[in-house]
């Protein structure tokens, strides 16, 4: 292995570690929701706002100016600052004594995380050649199941042994300590275009707006994320209410589903993109479309199961399938614009994906659950999730429609 290849893989590992912290801090709220609800006397709607809108409000909108800054200055500095900021606000969540205070702290987490992902996508695209780019982005995307599982398991364990506040203190403090180490060891990659020649944000928007594949990919991803983030936030509550698991059992169940199902799904998506995408660009959208459609009946069987073992087995395969889109679609977005616009293009994609998906997902499921409680009682959340599976069908249809224009919209 050459020194260049060795460093490139090391840098990717560091970016993966930062992304893992991103999802630990983002998803830990789900496993702690029941304890927070009881302590602060919150409703499901309020919990849904904390898991979605509070985080997504500025996370989605600030991603574009921060990505623009990263494209014109140092992407690694923007990532470092973002990591330190979101970790600080995660720790502050542990001090909250009311809905308003916790809502404000979650907004702060979103502000910090706004500058983490899009610049990381661009750094990876600069470091890795096209033939291995989808697999590199797949490895980076492992931060989603790894971080989500760590947040669920670590948060559940600490909350059960100490309290929910300590869980926020521990994960927030660890991220603050990681930030200077990341900046010390990860170098800014060389870019093809001079920094002074970076395009204005409006020019990037104009290029993307003229490409049908961008809108179809972004709206398809947003549809899937709306349900995906909703399930990630509410599934621990479902396991406690409908399957009667305690906090540690819930953490173990959902953490195992995320790891055993999610990791292979993401890696498979990257492998498919690199192996077949060079022959036909449409595969970057078509493979995720098929995966979403196959996942729906399996998820439905798991949600409606009355057996914990059966639910676990039913959840594994669709958990892999609904993560398959990440590497192919993110890779495709990198190739809708010239190289020096990649961070801004990624942020534009994430704006749509997160404002709709993250902003509405947990709130909508919580609101529907509240609305169905009079009829179904503790089983209301189960039926809210079942109805939400229509979003995966919509995501599959939009991704399939994106496959044809993607061939002509692609920029090498």
Image (cartoon, rainbow, N blue to C red):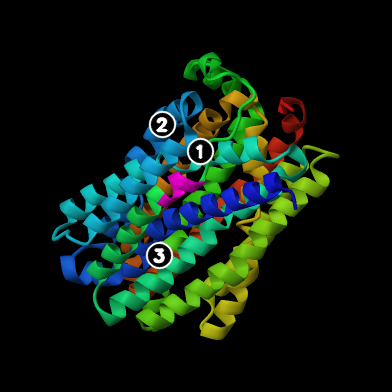
How far is disc 2 from disc 3 in space, using C-alphas?
30 Å
Label whose residue precedes the other's in the sequence (2 or 3): 2
Q: Is residue 379 above or below residue 266?
A: below
Mark 3 lies on residue: 234
Q: Residues within 10 Å of mark 1 (few under 14, many from 20)?
A: many
Cβ–Cβ under 8 Å for marks 2 and 1: yes
Instruction: Tell me what residue is drawn at x 65 percent, y 68 percent.
Output: 317
Q: Residues within 10 Å of mark 2 (few under 14, many from 20)?
A: many
Label whose residue precedes the other's in the sequence (2 or 1): 2
Q: Give the percent coordinates (x, y) of residue 208.
A: 59, 24
Instruction: Tell me what residue is drawn at x 23 percent, y 62 percent.
Output: 43
Q: Give the percent coordinates (x, y) of residue 81.
A: 36, 41
Numbered tag placed on residue 66 in the rendering = 2
How far is disc 2 from disc 1 in space, using C-alphas?
9 Å
Q: Is residue 398 visible?
A: no
The magenta region covers 181-185
Main secondary-structure element of the magenta-colored stretch? helix
Instruction: Tell me what residue is drawn at x 38 percent, y 78 percent.
Output: 240
Residue 163 lies within the magenta run: no
Mark 1 lies on residue: 118
Q: Give the number of the mark in front: 1 or 3.
A: 1
Identify the image quadrant of the C terminus: top right
Q: Nearer the viewer, residue 361 or 129?
A: 129
Q: Nearer the viewer, residue 137 or 284?
A: 137
């Amino acid at each position: 292995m050459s020194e260049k290849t060795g460093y490139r893989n090391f840098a990717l590992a560091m970016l993966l570690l930062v992304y893992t912290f991103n999802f630990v801090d983002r998803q830990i709220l789900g496993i702690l929701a029941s304890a927070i609800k009881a302590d602060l006397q919150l409703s499901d709607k309020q919990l849904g706002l904390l898991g979605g809108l509070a985080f997504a409000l500025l996370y989605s909108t600030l991603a574009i100016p921060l990505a623009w800054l990263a494209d014109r200055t140092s992407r690694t500095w923007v990532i470092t600052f973002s990591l330190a900021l979101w970790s600080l606000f995660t720790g502050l969540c542990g001090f909250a004594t009311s809905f308003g205070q916790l809502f404000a702290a979650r907004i702060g987490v979103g502000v910090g995380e706004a500058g983490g992902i899009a610049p990381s996508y661009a750094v990876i695209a600069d470091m890795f050649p096209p033939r291995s780019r989808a697999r590199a982005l797949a490895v980076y995307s492992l931060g989603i199941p790894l971080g989500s599982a760590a947040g669920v398991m670590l948060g559940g364990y600490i909350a059960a042994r100490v309290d929910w506040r300590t869980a926020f203190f521990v994960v927030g403090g660890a991220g603050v300590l990681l930030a200077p180490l990341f900046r010390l060891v990860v170098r800014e990659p060389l870019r093809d275009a001079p920094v002074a020649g970076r395009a204005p944000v409006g020019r990037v928007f104009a290029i993307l707006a003229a490409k049908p594949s961008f809108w179809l990919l972004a709206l398809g991803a947003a549809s899937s994320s709306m349900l995906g983030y909703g399930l990630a936030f509410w599934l621990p509550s479902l396991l406690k209410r409908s399957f009667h698991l305690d906090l540690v059992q819930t953490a173990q169940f959902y953490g195992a589903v995320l790891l055993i199902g999610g990791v292979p799904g993401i890696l498979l998506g990257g492998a498919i993109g690199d192996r077949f995408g060079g022959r036909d660009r449409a595969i970057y959208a078509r493979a995720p479309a098929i995966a979403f459609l196959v996942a729906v009946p399996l998820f439905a069987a798991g949600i409606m199961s009355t057996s914990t073992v059966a639910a676990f087995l039913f959840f594994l395969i669709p958990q892999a399938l609904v993560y398959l889109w990440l590497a192919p679609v993110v890779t495709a977005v990198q190739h809708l614009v010239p190289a020096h616009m990649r961070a801004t293009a990624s942020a534009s994609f994430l704006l749509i994906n997160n404002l709709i998906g993250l902003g509405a997902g947990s709130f909508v499921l919580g609101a529907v659950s509240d609305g169905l409680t009079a009829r179904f009682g503790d089983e209301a959340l189960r039926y809210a999730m079942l109805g939400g599976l229509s979003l995966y069908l919509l995501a599959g249809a939009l991704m399939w429609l994106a496959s044809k224009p993607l061939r002509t919209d692609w920029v090498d």
